[in-house]
Amino acid sequence: MEHDDRALIEKYGSQDPELGKLMKEHEEFEARIEDLNKRPYLSPEEALERKRLQKQKLSGRDRIEQIVSEYRKREQGE
């Protein structure tokens, strides 16, 4: 994420429940993925879990980008 995006997320994250929830989930997914990536070997179930988490993280990030884009447009219009 760009620095400007992070600033908007910090500014609106506490005001926008959806954005706050998505950021929290994003951090949780990232931590879980990192935990799985640290393992020297993943069982088939763990590999599927990592793939599922990566997809969920990406989906959430896409929505975060949409929300941030809306806030960016609002701020540029002011």
Image (cartoon, grey):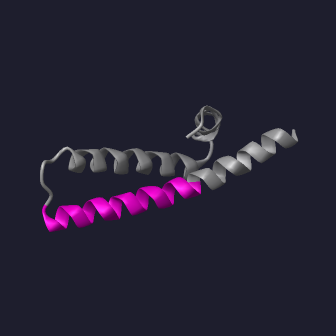
* x then y, percent, for residue 29: 36, 51
Total labels drawn: 0
Which quadrant of the figure contains the C terminus? top right
In the rendered image, residue 77, in percent from the top left (x then y), is placed at 87, 43
4 over 44 or under it: above or below: above
The answer to if 19 sits in the magenta stretch is no
Question: Residue 34 at x, y = what percent?
Answer: 28, 45
Which secondary structure is most common in the magenta stretch? helix
Q: Which residues are magenta?
A: 43-63
Q: Quadrant of the N terminus?
A: top right
Residue 39 vs 63, above or below: the answer is above
Quadrant housing residue 43: bottom left
Q: Furthest residue to the front?
A: 40
Q: Position of residue 44 (x, y in %)?
A: 16, 67
Residue sitting at x 59%, y 37%? 2
Taking the magenta stretch, the answer to whether it contains residue 55 is yes
Q: Residue at x 15, y 58 (%)?
A: 42
Left or right side of 75 for 33: left
- Between 13 and 72, the residue placed more toward the observer is 72
